[in-house]
Image (cartoon, rainbow, N blue to C red):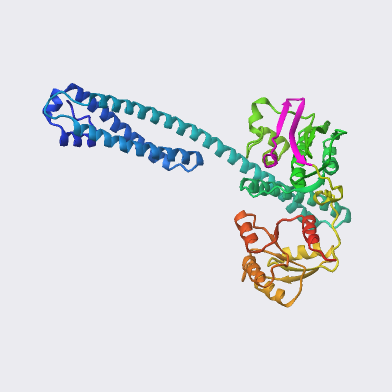
Amino acid sequence: MDKSNLHRHLNRQIDKYLSENTLRNNSDLSSFIKVINQTYLNYEKDAELFEQSARLNDKEYSEINNKLKQEISKRDLFELKLIEAINQLNVDGVKLEGKDNLLDLIKILNREIEIKKEFQEQLNSAKIIAEKANDAKSEFLSIMSHEIRTPLNAIIGLVYIMEKENSLESFHENIEVLKHSAQNLFLLINDILDFNKIEAGKVDIEKIPFDFKELIKQIAKSLQVKASENLNTIQINIDVDFQPNLISDPLRINQIITNLVSNAIKFTKEGTITITVNQISIINDISTFKFEVKDTGIGIDKENFQNIFQKFSQAETKTYRQFGGTGLGLVITKKLLDLLESDIQFESEIGIGTKFYFTISLPINKHFDTVVTDDLQENYKEQDLHGMRVLLVEDNLINIKIAQKIMSQWNVEVDLAENGLVGVEKFNLNSYDVILMDLSMPVMDGYEATSLIREKDKLIPIVALTASASFGYLDRALQIGINEYIIKPFNPKELNMKLRKYYKG
C-alpha cells in the first residue's frame, strides 16, 4: 500500500498501530484506510471553511458558524471512534473482525460529506443574502444623505440670501421656504427615530379613548394642501354603521393613516385618494372594521411586491429618483400594525393605482366625554401657560435662545442654568413647576443633576430636552427619575403639550 498519499496524522496512527505485513496482506484494511484518509482530508477542508466563516460578522453567518462548531464537536467524537476501530483490528494478519462496525463508520462518513455540502450551500446562500443587504444599506445611506442635504442646502442658501436681501416681500417668501425645508428635515429625522425605536422594541401601545372618524377627517384636512400640489382630491367614505368611539393608541394610528395617505398623494398626479372604513362586526364591545386607502396613481410592478415592506428599500431605485422619500414609511406602518395585532395588505396594478388596507379589532369607548383627538393633530393650538415657572438646564446658547423665545409666546417664566450643577443649586433655592433638563452638559450632566434633585424631591416633573436619541441613554434617564423626554429637534407644539400636562394655572 502506498503511504505517501496518506494524511500525515493518519500515517502516524498506522505506523503506531499497524505493521507493514498487515497492510500488505489485507485488502479490506487498505480500502478502509483510504476511506479514513478521505475523512481526514475532508476534515481539513471543513476546518478551513470554519476558519473562513469565523471571519464573517453578519448575523446569518454567526448562526451558521454556531452550527458548524456543533458539527465539528461531533466530528471529534467520530475521529475517536475511528481510532478505537483501528485499535480493535487484529494486527497478526488474521481476517479483520468488526466488519459490521466498519460499514457503520463508512455510512457515518457519507453522512458527514452530505452535511459538509449542506453547510457549504447554506454559507453560499447566506453570503448572497448578506451582499444584497449590504447593497440595500448602501443605497439607503445614499438616499438618506440626499434627503438630508436637500433641505439643509435650502436652509443654508436662504439664510445667505436673507442676509443680502432686505425687502419685506422677500423675507416672507424666504421664511415660508425655510419653514418647509425645516419641516421636511424634521419629518425625515422622526422617521429614522421611529424606525430605530420600533426595531429596538421600545414602542408601547397606549390605550386612549379617541374618535376614529374625527381622526380621519383631521388627517385628510392636514394633508389637503399637499394633495392639491399634485392636483389630487381626497375623498372619505365611512360606513353609516361604523362605531367611531374607540380605545387604542391614536398617535400610532394617526401615524399609520398619515403614512398611507401621504404615500398615495406622493405617487398620484391629478387623481383621487379615497379613504374607506367598513364596519365588519361589533361583538362584546369589540369593533372589527376594515380600513382602506385607494389611489389612482402609478401603481406597483408585481416583480417589486415583495420589496415594498423591506427596510432600506423602495419598490425601485428609479421610484426614489422621481418621487423622493426614505423608503421607511411602509416599513414603519407594517411594524406598527403588527404591534396593534393587525397586518397591512395591498393590491396594485401599473397605471391603474394601488389599494392598501388592513382589518383591525379595537375596544369600544362607552364614555364619549373622554374622547380626545386634537392633541395629536397638526392643527393643535398651543395653550397659554401664563405664570408657569420652568427651570431650563441647557449649555448651548442657541438652544437657550430658541427655547426662551418659544416659551415666551406662551407667557412661561423661564429661569436658566448653564449646566447640571447650577441647575441643582437653583432648584434648591427656588420653586418651579417643571424642569427641562439637557442630558449632555459640561461640569455636571443631566443624569447626575436629576439624581441629586430626586434625592430631595420625588414629585417635581423633570422632562429631558435632549438630542441624545439612543435608547440606552433614554432608558437610563427614565430609570434615574426623568418623567419623559423630548428629542431635539423638537416640535414646539409637542413641548407645549408636555408643559400643559403640568400646568397648574
Residue at 75% x, 49% y: name it: 154
Q: Is residue 267 visible?
A: yes
Q: Nearer the viewer, residue 87 or 138?
A: 87
**Which residue is the extreme one toward the bottom?**
429
Q: Please say if 309 is above or below 148.
A: above
Q: Is residue 391 left or right of residue 165?
A: left
Q: Please say if 158 is above or below 297.
A: below
Q: Would you say residue 198 sits in the magenta stretch?
A: no
Q: Please say if 497 is above or below 290.
A: below
Q: Nearer the viewer, residue 314 or 277?
A: 277
Residue 333, quarter of picture: top right
Q: Quadrant of the C terminus?
A: bottom right
Q: Would you say residue 345 sits in the magenta stretch?
A: yes
Q: Is residue 390 left or right of residue 93?
A: right
- Image coordinates for residue 293, horizontal then vertical, percent: 78, 33
Q: Is residue 432 left or right of residue 108?
A: right
What count of labels does the image hold? Answer: 0
The magenta stretch is 336-363
- Image coordinates for residue 18, horizontal then vertical, percent: 15, 32
Residue at 68% x, 42% y: name it: 339
Residue 493, quarter of picture: bottom right
Residue at 60% x, 56% y: name it: 472
Residue 47, quarter of picture: top left
Q: Is residue 220 visible?
A: no
- Image coordinates for residue 238, horizontal then vertical, percent: 85, 34
Q: Nearer the viewer, residue 381 or 246?
A: 246
Q: Nearer the viewer, residue 80 or 33?
A: 80
Q: Quadrant of the N terminus?
A: top left
- Image coordinates for residue 233, horizontal then vertical, percent: 86, 34
Q: Please say if 401 is above or below 348.
A: below
